[in-house]
Amino acid sequence: VLEEFATRTTMHGVPKVIKAKSSLARIFWALVCVCAGAMFCLQMTEVLTRYFSYPKKVTVEVVPTQVPFPSISICNMRNLDVYILNTLNAIEILFISEYMSLVAKYAPLWYQYQMDLPEVFQEVFSRTTFSANIRHDIIASAAVQLEGFVVNCHYAGHRCNRTRDFLRFFDPYYFNCFTYQAPEADDLDDSLSEGIENGWSAILLSGSGMLDKNSEIRMLPGLHEWRSAVSASEGVRVVIHPPHTKPFPFAEGYDVPPGFSASFGIRPRRNIRIGPPHGNCSNNNPFEIGNTRYRLMACQKMCMQKHIITECDCADIGLPILPDQKVKLCRNDDEMPIECQYNATNNCLDMLMALHNRIQCVRTVKARLTKNATAMERCQCFPPCDEVAYDVSYSLSKWPASGYEGDSAFYDVFGIEKFAERFNRSDTQGKFQLFKKYFTVDRRAETMKDFARLNIYIADSNVVKTQESADYTRNQVVSDIGGQLGLWVGISIITLAEVLELMLDIL
């Protein structure tokens, strides 16, 4: 049966070996078949090696497609309400009571050791430490409020709805921040058009931290930080991020000073990535983070939080809180004995240093993880599979202009918008009187230096689309294997059918 198969098979070379009339010819054809088979095995190995390396290709194209307008998060760098800042010693509210209690707790230690331990008190008297020790709702009640921050706002020529379009969130450094989420494109047909007039524009009260000028130096521990890289600044912190994602104002964004108009031209990019086995991407946060969309930065920060909890036995207030988190915050102070409010004993100093050591532990873990990519990879944080990102160009111009244009801006804020008048209520009468005192027509040029204007718009509606795809597919593998079989050993589908027939005959 085998000899008959060898003589009539369509497999090239084998019949030649059987039908050869001389031994020399039989040896020649046998060598040809062996060499061809070896070459086929070599080529087959290369084909399979390439396929199982799962190569991918990247295509880049510019397409005129619709993308969502980004979310815009804004924070006032003067994090307390202007009225609170100007009347700290004159009004009784829960925040001031909690604030003074926290300062008093460390006052004896500060007076005795401030020159010897400046770095320690820099951490203890910081905004983030105060955020960890005073309830967030208490801080939020004394922080910048939306109605006193956003004078007016327009998107695509339509007036914003402050109640519907803005969402407040708490940041441990900036306190109250606000995210503007644009309406869906279907609601505003021209919302994705290019140009400033079709974007988002707002006037914000960004300055006015201390309207009352003090004849003496006044320090507010925890509110004024004397060595922080971002302290003693005023203006607006702006973060432009994908819709429905969590912003991180302290880690990303731009600073806009008061008295200026800032223009942000955005160019959307869409990144479509391929998942395993060709690449690594994800649409889910392994740590979960509420109802926000997946974002690589959020996942990495939660991964960092996980390492901090493991190594420091506490959590960092500057990072997202993990679900079911049971440990205390690293900046939570310990319950200090009552004697520490009167005497700087060694026991009180030890408790102060314990707080400082926890904070230093956080810094050490962050520094190590930043340098160690392998540790971060274990958290399975991968880029989103389908992501819209925004390239931003940022420019500043003096605003408002002097002369009648400045008068026009003043009239817009206080005449048309009636910014001061919106506080003429019984519960905000103090702020209303403060604004009436300082925001006057005689001081209009000086007044407008406390405001800033933001213009955020699409500079180019053509989207740069970057898409990953498999570079070597199964169909290509089958095609290449078939080609190698035909080239080197002359095997086709018909030959395989002959082999199947042979097996049936043998059985």
Image (cartoon, rainbow, N blue to C red):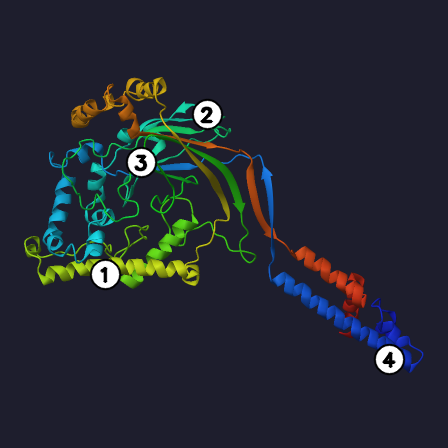
Residue 432 falls in which quadrant of the image? top left
Q: Sequence-wise, which precedes: disc 1 or disc 2?
A: 2
User: At label 3, which amino acid type do we have?
Assistant: Gly
* Residue located 15% across and 60% down the image: 351
Name the residue beneath numbered marker 4.
Answer: 27
The residue labelled by disc 3 is: 235
**Is label 3 or label 4 in front?**
3
| Mark in front: 4 vs 1 | 1
Quadrant in which the C terminus is drawn: bottom right
How many neighbours does mark 3 have within 10 angstroms: few (below 14), some (14-19), or many (20 or more)? many
Residue depicted at x 33% and y 60%: 365
Q: What is the crowding at mark 1: few (fewer than 14 residues within 10 Å), some, or many (at least 20)? A: some
Which element type, helix, strand or loop, lies under badge 2?
A: helix
Cα gap from disc 3 to disc 1, whole angstroms: 33 Å
Q: Which mark is residue 357?
A: 1
Which label sits in the foreground, 4 or 2?
Answer: 2
